[in-house]
Amino acid sequence: AAATLPVGETLFISCEAGVAPLYGTGHVVMNVLEAMMNTGKDVLTVMNELYKDIRTGNPNYKFVKNVVIDNVSELSDQITACYVKMHNKGTPELREYGETSWTFREWVHNWRDLVEVGINVVFNSWEADYPITEVEGIMLTKTCPKVGKANIPSLCGLVDIVGHLEVDEKSQRRWIRIAPSRQYMTKTQFKGLCTGPNGEATPGEPANLPDIIRKVKEYDYSK
């Protein structure tokens, strides 16, 4: 779905071992693992330097109007591995998981705020089922971004939209569930989404990110 963003305006930050879904699309891809191997720097340094370059308008990133981090579940694991190595341990313990959560929340906050300089940011994530306690005290199991149970409320609260990519069984068309759901962790801060052509309520939007961004920006919020 993120590959629907315009070529020449979009930077993919790949935190995975491969970029097969992007082969042939023409998008610019920065592979974090390759950058770490080529420079000898750890993931903390690579990501912090990249953010600074984009935020401060480094000429190499002047083309960037959209950033896609693919995916934050892998990125979280890499942060934990980095802290394990820094502390000369063989496996992560409570300290490493705590430092990962703090760093991860800080990064999501910082990258999300690139919208202040006109850059749209998309965080891709694996999914996992987590128990969620609602206001009424009812316990539900929801499908949420795989970012650690303790991080879910704060991270989903930081971003403007949380969506779940789905496929219509009949038409096979892909769409993104955005409206509030008891089964999935989803939300939107924007009134311009989850409405059909005649103003009727819909559970989501077609999986075309440029159209979603356009609807958000063109909506008349004075209504």
Image: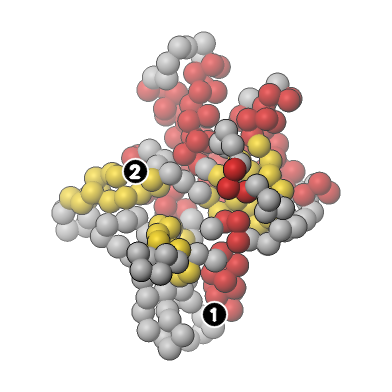
Q: Which residue is mark 1?
A: 219
* Residue 163 rendering spot, x and y as whole percentages: 43, 59
Give above or below for 210 relative to 127.
below
The amino acid type, in three-letter code, at marker 1 is Tyr
Query: Which numbered marker is on residue 128?
Result: 2
For the point 54% across and 69% down, the residue is 212
Neighbours of disc 1 within 10 Å: few (<14), some (14-19), many (20+)? few
Image height check: is 21 above or below 36?
below
Residue at 68% over, 62% down: 6
Q: Is residue 175 visible?
A: no
Taking 133 as reference, is 76 left or right? right
- Residue 75 in the image, given as x and y percentages of width and height: 53, 36
Q: Residue at x 32, y 50 (%)?
A: 143
Residue 73 at least partly seen: yes
Q: Which residue is outermost to the bottom?
A: 198
Of helix, strand and loop, which one carries label 1? loop
